[in-house]
Image (cartoon, helix red, strand yellow):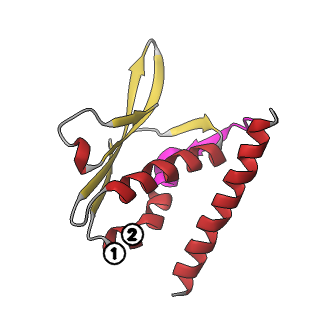
Amino acid sequence: MLMLIQRNVNILLRLVNQILDFRKYENGKMEYTPVTVDVLSSFEGWNESFQAAARKKHIHFSFDSMPDTDYHTLADMEKLERIYFNLLSNAFKFTPENGRIAVRLSSLCKEDKRWIRFTVVPPALSGQTALCVY
């Protein structure tokens, strides 16, 4: 119970920070702060926040990644977390009970650059174009 309360407090704190960041964006004061991020371990940790929602709606939530792949990159951790939480929150919001949500993390080379891509596939998109973020 205490873990659930802590998780909900963190979600509310993120929402407050998003509102404050929106004001920064409006005023042209939002900054990009890149740090080295292990995307795989970050996503795995953030996925824990969605386990209760998955159980509540009986949604099969899966996460997979390419084995033996380096998922370290430079990114703004706060913004990456916000993007991930918003995408998954929407996926859970619009996925019906007993549905499926799959997140896939992969790496690819494009124009001689290494890219990390994650794909969120809610059931409404199964077999169709999924949402990919690079």
Q: Are marks 1 and 2 in contact (CB under 8 Å)?
A: yes
Look at 63% across and 44% down and name the residue there.
79
The amino acid beneath tag 2 is Ala
Q: Is residue 8 left or right of residue 93?
A: right
Expressed as whole percent of the image width and height from the top left, the position of residue 5 reads 57, 81
Q: Amino acid at mark 1?
A: Lys
Residue 129 at x, y percent in the picture: 27, 32
- Label 1 crowd (10 A; few <14 / some 14-19 / many >=20): few
Horizontally, is 108 left or right of 45 in the view?
Answer: left
Q: Which mark is residue 22?
A: none
Residue segment shown in magenta:
31-43
Seen as rendered, the residue at the extreme bottom is 1
Give residue 111's quadrant in the image.
top left
Q: Which residue is mark 2?
A: 53
Seen from this angle, which residue lies furthest top? 111
Can you say whether 111 is above or below 122 in the image?
above
Q: Residue 25: name its quadrant.
A: top right
Number of other residues with Cα within 10 Å of mark 2, as a class: few under 14, some 14 to 19, many 20 or more:
some
